Amino acid sequence: MSEGNKTLVIEFVLTGLTERPWLQVLLFLMFLVVYLITMVGNLGLMILIWKDAHLHTPMYLFLGGLAFADACTSTSVTPRMLVNFLDKTAMISLAECITQFYFFASSATTEYFLLVVMAYDRYVAICNPLLYLVVMSKKLCTQLISISYAIGFLHPLIHVSLLLRLTFCRSNIIHYFYCEILQLFKISCNDPSINALMIFIFAAFIQISTLMTIIISYTRVLFDILKKKSEGRSKAFSTCSAHLLSVSLYYGTLIFMYVRPASGLTDDQDKMYSLFYTIIIPLLNPFIYSLRNKEVVGALRRVAKK
């Protein structure tokens, strides 16, 4: 398709993680296993929460919502990456590219707000335990999860609508393993400055506002924990540790990726950190929240005995 002397690109080639032929099959097998474990871990956790009545509490309701978001994040990126490992000539259309970006950005945005909701849940549980079941009613929990997903679905529409104004003619090669929006800007015929500015404004607002809310919640929680006796203190810390580890991994990766000098990382290093954010964290989260959680382990044993 051409416009004047310019050939407009409507299909792209994703170069993937590496162009070394001898690594393709090995990486395919490795990430296939990672993807299967991710899906079994997250969907299994959702089914366990649904099946076991002991887990029908606000904390696990939010955890189920987070597990679904993680499954969506992994599914938006990994299957296409697996195809590219086996067929380097496989093309991805502009519509497919934009769709992949939309679903990835939706699940990632949703996760930000679910982590905030989970921090608020821990704040109420530890600082106001007697009012916990009154404040965190089933109706409020459903509303908080619904709002998180609604923001997640609506936010990327802004960037998709701006992306549709761009045309691509410089190259049909995207040097990445998924349709990362900043990589699309690099091959745009038009000036993507407005798009990049909107990405920066919304990303900064969402990341800073959600992180600050989590920090404020846990600051209040910390002060309240320090007032408790040693036994209560240990129990309170154990209920927060998994969430704090998940938050640290999620935001730590983002901060390391974006708050650094432009020349700080090579392209391969940049891919590795993106890989951690898009694939490894969804793999780790169900294990972070489950392995040392006596209630989840107990629920798994009860379901297994049925």
Image (cartoon, rainbow, N blue to C red):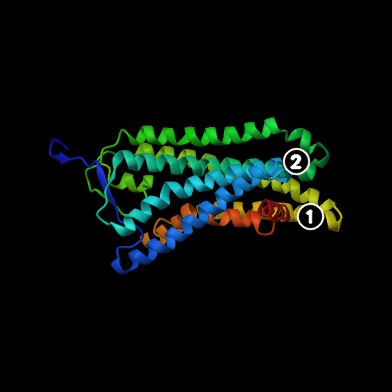
Residue beneath label 2, please? 124
Query: In the image, what residue occupies the spot 58% across and 45% down?
Result: 66
Left or right, 28 with respect to 287, comes to: left
Q: Which residue lies furthest to the right in this view?
A: 229
| Residue 90 pos. (x, y %) | 27, 51
Q: In which quarter of the image is residue 25?
A: bottom left
**Residue 132 position within the rendered picture, expressed as x and y whole percent measured from the top left:** 78, 38
Point 31% across, 38% down: residue = 95
Classed neighbour count for the residue bearing mark 1: other residues with Cα under 10 Å, few (<14), some (14–19), many (≥20): few
- Front residue of 105 and 196: 105
* Residue identifier under label 1: 235
Q: Is residue 180 left or right of residue 71?
A: left
SS for tag 2?
helix
- How far apart marks 2 and 1 lie (CA) works out to 15 Å
**Could you tell me if residue 131 is visible in this image?**
yes
Identify the residue shown where x is 51% and y is 51%. 39
Residue furthest front in the image:
306
Q: Where is residue 92 in the image (x, y as percent from the top left)?
A: 29, 46
Quadrant housing the N terminus: top left
Q: Amino acid type of disc 2?
A: Val
- Is disc 2 in contact with disc 1, using a CB cutoff of under 8 Å? no
Q: Is mark 1 on a helix, strand or loop?
A: helix
